Amino acid sequence: MGRGVFADAPIRRGEIIEVCPVIPLTKSDEEKLGQTILDYYMFAWGREQQAACIALGFGGLYNHSSSPNAVVYEVTSESRIEFVALRDIEPGQQIFIDYQWEESEYHFPRVEG
């Protein structure tokens, strides 16, 4: 799973967990970054999700679940994304989002250091 984001206080359904500024990427930037480890940290962005962005803050550290307890909302006009609780989250629980990737994209090679 890698890193993750955990609740340090109770979070109620519908509550904003975090607001993250984003760096919208040009198509050229997206193609270049797509060849690096940052490919795993890009979010779909913009009209019909045809562009990409990098989220600042803890945005890139939320892990995936097919039954997430949070959702990501795009606020394009303000270049930010908001992480919002889908249900109550207790202190110590990890916060998960659904990456909405294709199944084959979830399998990462293990790199030994």
Image (cartoon, rainbow, N blue to C red):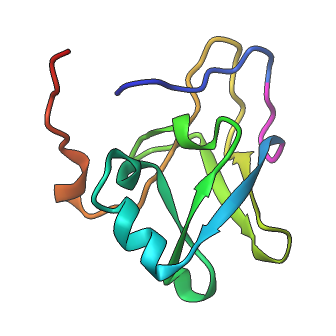
33 shown above or below 51: above
Q: Position of residue 18 (x, y in %)?
A: 78, 41
Q: Magenta stretch mostly in which secondary structure?
A: loop
Q: Position of residue 38 (x, y in %)?
A: 41, 49
73 shown above or below 41: below
Q: For residue 75, which quarter of the picture?
A: bottom right
Label count reads: 0
Q: Position of residue 52 (x, y in %)?
A: 52, 70
Q: Viewer-proximal residue, 69 or 79?
A: 79
Task: Indicate whether residue 58 is drawn in magenta.
Answer: no
Give the magenta-colored segment's residue range.
11-15
Which residue is pictured at 63% across the width and 43% down the height? 59
Q: Viewer-proximal residue, 86 or 59?
A: 59
Q: Is residue 100 rendered to the left or right of residue 83?
A: left
Which residue is pictured at 79% across the width and 29% down the height? 11
Task: Indicate whether residue 12 is drawn in magenta.
Answer: yes
Q: Name the quadrant of the C terminus.
A: top left
Q: Is residue 37 rendered to the left or right of residue 12?
A: left
